[in-house]
Image (cartoon, grey):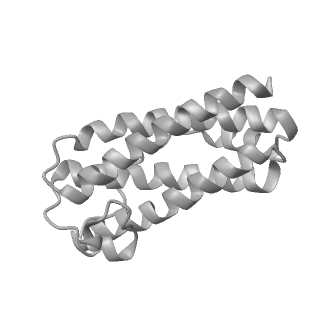
C-alpha cells in the first residue's frame, strides 16, 4: 500500500501520527530546530558555494529535511504538544553550530566556506544520528521510520562529506 511508504512525508503523513510517547515528543521538539539549522546552513551553501558537489549536497539536505520538519511539526500539533521544550537546548544540542559559528560560515567564501560547511554539517549529522537513540524503542512506527531514515541518509552523507573534504584540501 503506497500510503505506508517510507518515502511518504509531509502533511499527509503527519496527520496519521498518533500515540506519541514522551520521548517521541521530545525527539520532535529537539529535531525540529536541529533540522531548521541544517536547512539554514544548506541555504548558505546554495548562495555561497561554487563547488558543484557542495551545491548538490546542500540541495539534497534541504530537500530531505524541510519536509521532515513539517512532518514533525504535524506530530506535535496533533499531540497538542508545543514545538518548544519550555527551555532552550541551544548549543548543547548535538552538532548545533553556535551563532558565532553560523556567522563565520555565512561570511566565508570559496574553499574556506566549503570546508567550514562540510565540517559543520558532519558534526551536525553526527548529532542528529545520536539524537535518534531516544526513539529507538518508540512504539510509533512513523516516528521509528523517520529515525531510521535519518540514520541511513545522514550516515551516507557523512561518508560523502568526508570524501569531499579530502578532495578540497
**Quadrant of the snapshot with the C terminus:** top right
Q: Percent x, y for residue 78?
A: 24, 73
Please report the residue visible at 78 percent of the width from the left and 47 percent of the height from the top.
52
Q: Residue at x 35, y 62 (%)?
A: 72
Residue 167 versus residue 104: which sits nearer the camera? 167
Residue 39 can be seen in this image: no
Residue 120 at x, y = what percent? 62, 35
Numbered label tally: 0
The spot of residue 137 in percent (x, y) is: 16, 42
Which quarter of the figure has residue 131? top left
| Observer-nearest of 5 and 76 | 5
Q: Quadrant of residue 104?
A: top right
Q: Which part of the image, by quadrant, shows the N terminus? A: bottom left
The residue shown at (42%, 68%) is: 70
Instruction: Pick out the residue farthest to the front.
Output: 1
How far across and down, in percent of the image, does residue 86 sit?
A: 33, 54
Vertical relation: 130 (above or below) 33: above
Viewed as shown, does residue 18 lie left or right of 81? left
Residue at 68% of width from left, 56% of height from top?
43
> In which image quadrant can residue 130 be found?
top left
The correct choice, above or below, for 76 with respect to 152 in the image is below
Q: Is residue 127 visible?
A: yes
Amino acid at each position: 500500500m503506497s500510503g505506508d511508504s517510507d518515502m511518504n512525508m509531509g502533511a499527509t503523513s503527519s496527520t496519521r501520527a498518533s500515540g506519541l510517547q514522551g520521548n517521541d515528543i521530545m525527539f520532535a521538539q529537539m529535531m525540529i530546530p536541529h533540522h531548521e539549522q541544517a536547512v539554514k546552513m544548506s541555504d548558505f551553501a546554495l548562495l555561497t558555494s561554487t563547488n558543484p558537489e557542495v551545491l548538490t549536497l546542500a540541495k539534497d539536505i534541504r530537500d530531505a529535511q524541510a519536509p521532515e520538519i513539517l512532518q514533525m511539526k504535524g506530530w506535535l500539533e496533533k499531540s497538542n504538544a508545543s514545538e518548544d521544550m519550555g527551555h532552550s537546548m541551544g548549543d548543547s544540542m548535538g552538532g548545533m553550530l553556535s551563532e558565532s559559528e553560523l556567522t563565520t560560515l555565512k561570511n566565508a567564501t570559496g574553499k574556506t566556506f566549503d570546508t567550514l560547511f562540510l565540517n559543520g554539517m558532519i558534526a551536525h549529522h553526527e548529532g542528529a544520528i545520536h539524537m535518534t537513540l531516544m526513539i529507538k524503542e518508540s512504539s510509533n512506527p512513523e516516528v521509528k521510520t523517520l529515525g531510521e531514515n535519518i540514520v541511513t541518509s545522514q550516515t551516507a552523507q557523512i561518508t560523502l562529506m568526508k570524501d569531499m573534504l579530502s578532495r578540497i584540501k
